[in-house]
Image (cartoon, rainbow, N blue to C red):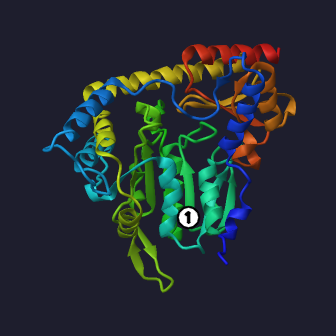
Amino acid sequence: MSLINENFLELEDSYLFSTIAKKVSTFTSKNPDKKVIKLGIGDVTRPIVPACLEAMHKAVDEVGTEQGFKGYGPEQGYQFLRKAIIENDYNTRNIEISEDEIFISDGAKCDCGNIVDIFGKDNKVAITNPVYPVYLDTNVMSGRNLTYLPVTAENNFIPQLPKEKVDMIYLCFPNNPTGTVLNREELTKWVKYAKENKSIIFYDAAYEAFIKEKDIPHSIYEIEGAKEVAIEFKSFSKTAGFTGLRCAYVIVPKDLKGYTKNGEQVSLNKLWNRRTCTKFNGVSYIVQRAAEATYTEEGKRQIRENIEYYMENAKTIKEGLEKAGFVCYGGVNSPYVWLKTPNGMKSWDFFDKLLNDIAVVGTPGVGFGDCGEGYFRLTAFGTKEATSEAVERIVKLFK
């Protein structure tokens, strides 16, 4: 008799975005003539930037030769990409990161879920509410105890420090789904808490490239002492159009320590490296060459254009809906706009109304946690034309 991991039975029957996809599929099959505008899943619409395409073409030609053929690459990632990350993402902010603290992966979502492999089941985990579902679901799968940190308009979407001691903390800023941020002072409080309680912070900075305002950290390692308490996740998906290519990276500092039940310190960098070498064969050479090209002058310019394009969409959504009387958050340092549903409407009811009445798709806030009830997320990752049309449809519907 093969016993299952019964923790999976504690999960919702379907992953949030799978549920949305099924609803949209049912609607489109019944209404084939209606133009559906999808501003729900954070999948980019602009193509991969030219600098990356050129790099991939060269890499394809290279591996087609005997001299340039590549077999299995290093599981941690090629040196050329890790070096580019250090020089551009960290040295420019006076942060010292070494190559062996960087692990190239096939996506920040995977990293955020897989990182729990190196931590014991008995750790108590703090997550915000609402929250990106992967943080919650992967820890439910592992059977860990969870404590929730409400993030609402009442506390300005700033999570408060836990009243009880926790061992693992998930923070995502700019935040998905609310689109809000933490300033340097607030983030410093978390680093201090983690040091005092020997906790580990999992810092998801997948959207840091969208930050516009000053005093908003782009990396948790801008905070003194953070390398002793934090693992950081970053992604190429939303900036260079890599949602389909799949490439990201995680920083596991060598200063970071975990503990055995006997209280002995253990290097988390070594544990993650061991896990990576066992369960992962590395991101393809071609994709890593594309990621490296994001750091060229042309690549940087093209990515800035992408970000500006999406942030104009965010502005269109936020300002257009606010003029119509909606209460909106985010959309300034993030490609997500978090809006309050009108007249106290439930999140899924609002979702159904938008889909069935005007063929616009977003994400119901309650899908991110019960504190998201009465809210709704729209993404800026549509085309300019589709975004404007979606806002017009919503405004007209609720006039």
76 relative to 207, above or below: below
Q: Position of residue 24 (x, y in %)?
A: 71, 31
Q: Position of residue 290 (x, y in %)?
A: 31, 36
Viewer can see residue 355: yes
Which of the 4 quarters of the picture holds residue 67?
top left
Describe the element under mark 1 as helix, strand or loop.
strand
Quadrant placement of the N terminus: bottom right
388 relative to 87, above or below: above
Viewer can see residue 188: no
Residue in view at x 57 percent, y 23 percent: 382
List the residue tagged with mark 1. 168
Residue in view at x 65 percent, y 52 percent: 128
Q: Nearer the viewer, residue 213 or 124?
A: 124
Is 135 positioned to the left or the right of 308 in the image? Answer: right
Circle 1 Cα neighbour tier, 10 Å, few/some/many (<14 / 14–19 / ≥20) = many
390 relative to 122, above or below: above
Residue in view at x 26 percent, y 42 percent: 84
Which of the 4 quarters of the picture holds residue 299?
top left
The three-letter amino acid code for the residue at tag 1 is Met
Is 10 positioned to the left or the right of 289 in the image? Answer: right
Is 340 positioned to the left or the right of 329 in the image? Answer: right
Residue in view at x 61 percent, y 62 percent: 139
Is 326 positioned to the left or the right of 111 in the image? Answer: right
230 relative to 173, above or below: below
Which of the 4 quarters of the picture holds residue 26?
top right
Residue projecting furthest to the left: 67
Q: Nearer the viewer, residue 77 or 129?
A: 77
